[in-house]
Image (cartoon, helix red, strand yellow):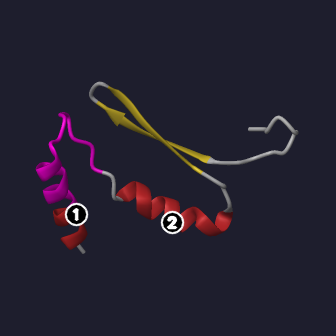
Amino acid sequence: MYSDKGAQMSSYLIGLAAKDGVFVLSVSPAKKDIDPLVKELVSSFKLVPRNLDAEEAKRLSSEAKAQP
């Protein structure tokens, strides 16, 4: 991608398949030193096929943090 001044920016675009479409996340800047961080972040995602209320989102987040 380029800014209106011509500066180039690289980013990761991560797409995760979901029943109703695709969840897409952009992480930038894309540099080799953040590759492990991006891989760790993506591996922590959990898609659920429904809307979550605040309590369920909090519970799922706590459960995910407790996993090794």
| Residue found at x 74% / y 47% | 9
The numbered dot on residue 21 is: none
Looking at the rendered image, the quarter that the C terminus falls into is bottom left
The x, y position of residue 40, in whole percent, is 43, 64
In the rendered structure, which amino acid carries the disc numbered 2?
A: Leu
| Residue found at x 39% / y 31% | 22
| Residue closest to the far bottom | 68
| Residue found at x 87% / y 39% | 5
Looking at the rendered image, the quarter that the N terminus falls into is top right
Q: What element carries label 2?
A: helix
Q: What element carries label 1?
A: helix
The residue identified by callout 1 is 64
| Residue found at x 24% / y 69% | 65
The x, y position of residue 42, in whole percent, is 41, 54
CA separation, marks 2 and 1? 17 Å
Residue 4, placed above or below residue 41:
above
Q: Which of marks 2 and 1 is nearer the N terminus?
A: 2
Q: Is residue 59 magenta?
A: yes
Residue 67 in view (yes/no): no
Q: Does the magenta stretch include residue 28?
A: no
Q: Between residues 9 and 16, which one lies in front from this camera angle?
A: 9
The residue identified by callout 2 is 37
